[in-house]
Image (cartoon, grey):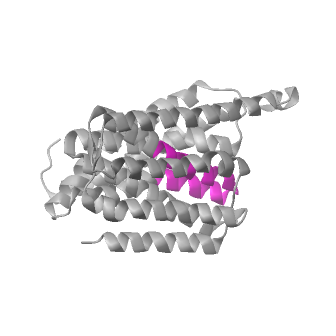
């Protein structure tokens, strides 16, 4: 696709973000309905099916960014997206309605979120995340998946015949929604990478800044939409599980896959600012969860303020 003018690039950027959003909505709706048809609970659906579905934009953007632009773009999109998930997505959701914390998510899934952040920083501290590092991340992903599947099996065994009879049937249109969502995500991510990278590069911004801001915000739209809707409906466990699961998949699955395909370079600026910011936001979220059984509106305000400060400090 040829980029002729700033207007064309802006249209690509807007169209890409819109397709990402529409695709993720289709994917979330279809995958969520399919999961509920087999009896998964809201927190489990949030941390597995929906989290994986809303991670798809980061995967496509990072793969396309690494292959067609630079690995800085893909890495920036992941780090920025994880920070946006905590500061913006959970912060805004908590401002709408305080978020109750599922014990299962806190005890079984949050440790993997912390591990993923520590692995990313540790493996990337020498300036490069190579194929061996990618395999290590994917091994951690397999371990996380095993923990989730064990929990799903326990949930399934606890469903009574009466509850099973009331569960909705899986429908062909749900599978079609998943497929349509994936197609929209592929197209949307390509437009977002091309439009965002070209527009900001022309303005003199670095690849890592592009990834940490425009691309990260664009790929966090699905998480934001799903979590805000869940908060409005009073399904807080869904919101928290979605963010925790997304942050795990972003690092273990996306960075793992990209690193196996092509080495990821980690600039000194990322190691000096973005990595510490990721660890700080992760530690802040764990602290808020540990302190009480919910993330309050005040906590939400703190998270949003922290994210605004992060974006301000990123400005050249």
Q: For the image shown, how many numbered marks are present on the structure?
A: 0
Q: Residue at x 66, y 48 (%)?
A: 105
Q: Position of residue 215 (x, y in %)?
A: 33, 54
Q: Residue at x 69, y 67 (%)?
A: 291
Quadrant assignment, res 228: bottom right
Q: Which residues are magenta?
A: 221-250
Q: Position of residue 22 (x, y in %)?
A: 45, 45
Vertical arrangement, residue 217 with respect to residue 306, above or below:
above
Is residue 100 in sight in this rendering? Answer: yes
Magenta-span inclusion, residue 225? yes
Q: Residue at x 60, y 60 (%)?
A: 286
**Quadrant, the C terminus:** bottom left
Magenta-span inclusion, residue 224? yes
Residue in front for this viewpoint, 175 or 116 = 116
Q: Position of residue 223 (x, y in %)?
A: 51, 52
Residue in front for this viewpoint, 125 or 137 = 125
Residue in front for this viewpoint, 284 or 167 = 284
Q: Position of residue 62 (x, y in %)?
A: 33, 43
Vertical arrangement, residue 56 with respect to residue 106, above or below:
above
Check the image and name the residue furthest to the left. 4
**Does residue 285 appear left or right of residue 253 in this picture?**
right
Vertical arrangement, residue 165 with respect to residue 7, above or below:
above
Q: Residue at x 70, y 57 (%)?
A: 234
**Quadrant, the N terminus:** top left
Q: Main secondary structure of the magenta part?
A: helix
Residue in front for this viewpoint, 227 or 242 = 242
**Does residue 199 appear left or right of residue 52 in this picture?**
left
Is residue 192 in sight in this rendering? Answer: no
């Amino acid at each position: 696709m040829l980029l002729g003018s700033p207007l064309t690039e802006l249209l690509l950027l807007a169209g890409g973000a819109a397709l990402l959003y529409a695709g993720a909505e289709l994917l979330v709706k279809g995958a969520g309905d399919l999961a509920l048809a087999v009896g998964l609970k809201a927190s489990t659906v949030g941390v597995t099916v929906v989290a994986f579905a809303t991670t798809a934009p980061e995967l496509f953007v990072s793969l396309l960014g690494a292959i067609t632009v630079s690995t800085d773009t893909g890495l920036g999109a992941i780090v920025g997206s994880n920070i946006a998930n905590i500061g913006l997505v959970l912060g805004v959701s908590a401002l709408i309605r305080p978020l109750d914390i599922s014990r299962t998510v806190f005890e079984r899934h949050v440790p993997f979120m912390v591990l993923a952040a520590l692995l990313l920083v540790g493996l990337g501290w020498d300036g490069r995340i190579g194929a061996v590092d990618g395999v290590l991340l994917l091994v951690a992903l397999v371990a996380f998946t095993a923990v989730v599947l064990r929990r799903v099996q326990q949930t399934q065994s606890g469903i009574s015949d009466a509850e099973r009879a009331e569960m909705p049937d899986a429908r062909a249109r749900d599978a079609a929604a998943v497929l349509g969502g994936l197609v929209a995500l592929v197209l949307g991510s390509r437009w977002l990478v091309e439009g965002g990278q070209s527009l900001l590069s022309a303005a003199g911004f670095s690849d890592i800044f592009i990834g940490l801001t425009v691309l990260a915000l664009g790929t966090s739209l699905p998480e934001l939409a799903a979590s805000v809707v869940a908060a409005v409906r009073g399904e807080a466990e869904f919101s928290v599980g979605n963010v925790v699961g997304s942050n795990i998949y972003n690092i273990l699955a996306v960075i793992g896959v990209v690193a196996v395909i092509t080495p990821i370079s980690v600039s000194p600026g990322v190691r000096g600012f973005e990595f510490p910011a990721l660890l700080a936001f992760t530690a802040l979220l764990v602290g808020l969860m540990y302190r009480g059984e919910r993330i309050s509106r005040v906590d939400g305000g703190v998270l949003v303020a922290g994210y605004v400060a992060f974006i301000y400090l990123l400005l050249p």
